[in-house]
Image: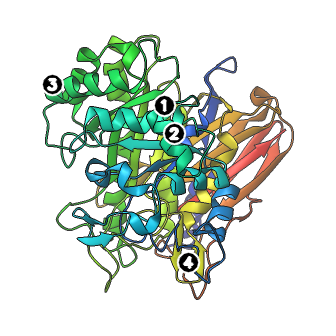
Amino acid sequence: MKKTTFFLLLLTFCSQISIAQKEATVITIKNTENTTIINKNIYGHFAEHLGKCIYGGFFVGDTSKIPNTAGVRNDVVAALKDLKIPNLRWPGGCFADTYHWKDGIGPKEQRPTIVNQWWGGVTEDNSFGTHDFLNMCELIGTEPYLAGNLATGTVQEMADWVQYVNFAGKSPMSDLRVKNGRKEPWKVKIWGVGNEAWGCGGNMTPDYYAGEYRKYATFMSDWTNSGGLMRVASGANSGDYNWTETIMKNIPGNMLGGVALHHYSVIDWNKKGDAVDFAEDIYFRTMTEALKMEELVTKHSAIMDKYDPKKKIALVVDEWGGWYEVEKGSNPGFLYQQNTMRDAVLAGTTLNIFNNHAERVRMANLAQCVNVLQAVILTDKTKMLLTPTYHIMKMYAVHQDAKLIPLSFESPSYTFNDKTLPAINVSASKDAKGLTHISLVNIDSKKENKIEIDLNALGIKTITGTILKSSKLQDHNTFENPTKIQPTVFKGFEIKKGKLEIVIPPFSVITLEGK
């Protein structure tokens, strides 16, 4: 090859690289006058009687050497308080429809035991019950979300529970509460009427469940729901749109506060894959399932819009997250799994979807809080660590109750084995103090991506940033190295003529603050 030809080819190649390097995904502001609020309850959590979530996670008993308040771990309370969790769902899950709340009140030594038939077949002593949970919520500063037993309970049982925790006057249930040491009611507003009625909650048809819901909901409150209860119907499993249609069609809107939706990012229910030892093909499939949340939320919302055009009823995604095989050597019924950068990317992506659909999605619950599935906290006796998912939830807490800023852009592609996914997802908001926050995720496992945002359209001049990243997708925090992954200051951006140019590393999550 001649030297001149070689240099011409080299020059062309370098020019192409230079052009490619300059190309950026341009994000535009759709509507600065938008009034949609990102409800803080989107950032809710879930605590089921499952594995070591309650016993050994939240609750160690008041005789434990682990520092505690009335048996609840002080370190867990402090971590969740710092996370600003807005609500906490309990006692299930599948467990909720076998739980009888009166077994968990009164002197602990007199409480009957229960066999947890759903999760490991273990015997529990009911030492953690209604008072323990609701008092713990007060310690954390979070709103309780009680899931009532519709499948094996009775209408009277659920009505009694509402009266026990909420009624300030004199009644059999409020007298019993006072007898058990609590004078003032807790005033619980959020109530699930059964759980997964299509499956572990009774294998019901949507028509049958709608009738049961109407009956239970009727006796949970008075005629006008003067107590302001948010009654949440057991909703669809992922893409079961007929379930949502039937619920919305057959239950009067004034009886519905919310309709639930459950979706886990599972690649194969029979072979879920390892939580840590996974290759890129598994990561790609996991993110494919995570991104399905966009389609699910959009289609379920469209159905709800037909019956509730004013969007008075919330879409409540009260179970979401990654679900893998349990850690080797652990009880298969305890669903204990590690938490890697994959989970951080999954969490950021899902929260961006919820934020952008905040008109209808007004509550969600990550599954689960401690030691189960995509947990934000892991414990081992006296030890405790914060997972990558914890750090994402904390980075995104700035969006709670802030005004949504709608954005539009065309995402670059993340390609693997001739299949593609959108590499970038984003959400933005403006809080009551006038601060603008932008959260960005790059799901691409190998390539960085460039983003450009017009700061003048946002009315901001200065930017600071936080990033969560690591060298490998499989990286995670351990009890030996609990701070391997934690947020750091992000400086990978420039401001040029009112334009913010950002370089987002592979599989990373960023939150920017502008003022």
- Alpha carbon distance from label 1 to label 2: 6 Å
Q: Residue at x 27, y 22 (%)?
A: 214
- Which mark sits nearer the N-terminus, 2 or 4? 2
Which residue is tagged 4? 477
Q: Residue at x 49, y 60 (%)?
A: 369
Looking at the image, do the residues carrying marks 2 and 4 touch, with CB atoms under 8 Å apart? no
Q: Nearer the viewer, residue 202 or 154?
A: 154
- Which mark sits nearer the N-terminus, 1 or 3? 1
Q: Nearer the viewer, mark 4 or mark 3?
A: 3
Give residue 324's position: percent from left, percent from top.
32, 67
Tag on residue 171? 1
Give residue 301's position: percent from left, percent from top.
37, 25
Which residue is tagged 2? 175
Tag on residue 207? 3
Looking at the image, do the residues carrying marks 4 and 3 touch, with CB atoms under 8 Å apart? no
Q: Is residue 294 visible?
A: no
Query: Regarding mark 4 in the picture, which secondary structure is present there?
Result: loop
What sort of colour scheme is used for the picture?
rainbow
Query: Regarding mark 3 in the picture, which secondary structure is present there?
Result: helix
Q: Nearer the viewer, residue 285 or 422?
A: 285
Q: Is residue 210 visible?
A: yes
- Alpha carbon distance from label 1 to label 3: 35 Å
Q: Residues within 10 Å of mark 2 (few under 14, many from 20)?
A: some
- Alpha carbon distance from label 4 to label 1: 50 Å
**Which amino acid lies under the numbered mark 2 shown in the image of this protein?**
Asp
- Which mark sits nearer the N-terminus, 4 or 1? 1
Looking at the image, do the residues carrying marks 4 and 1 touch, with CB atoms under 8 Å apart? no
**Residue 32: quadrant of the picture:** top right
Looking at the image, do the residues carrying marks 1 and 2 touch, with CB atoms under 8 Å apart? yes
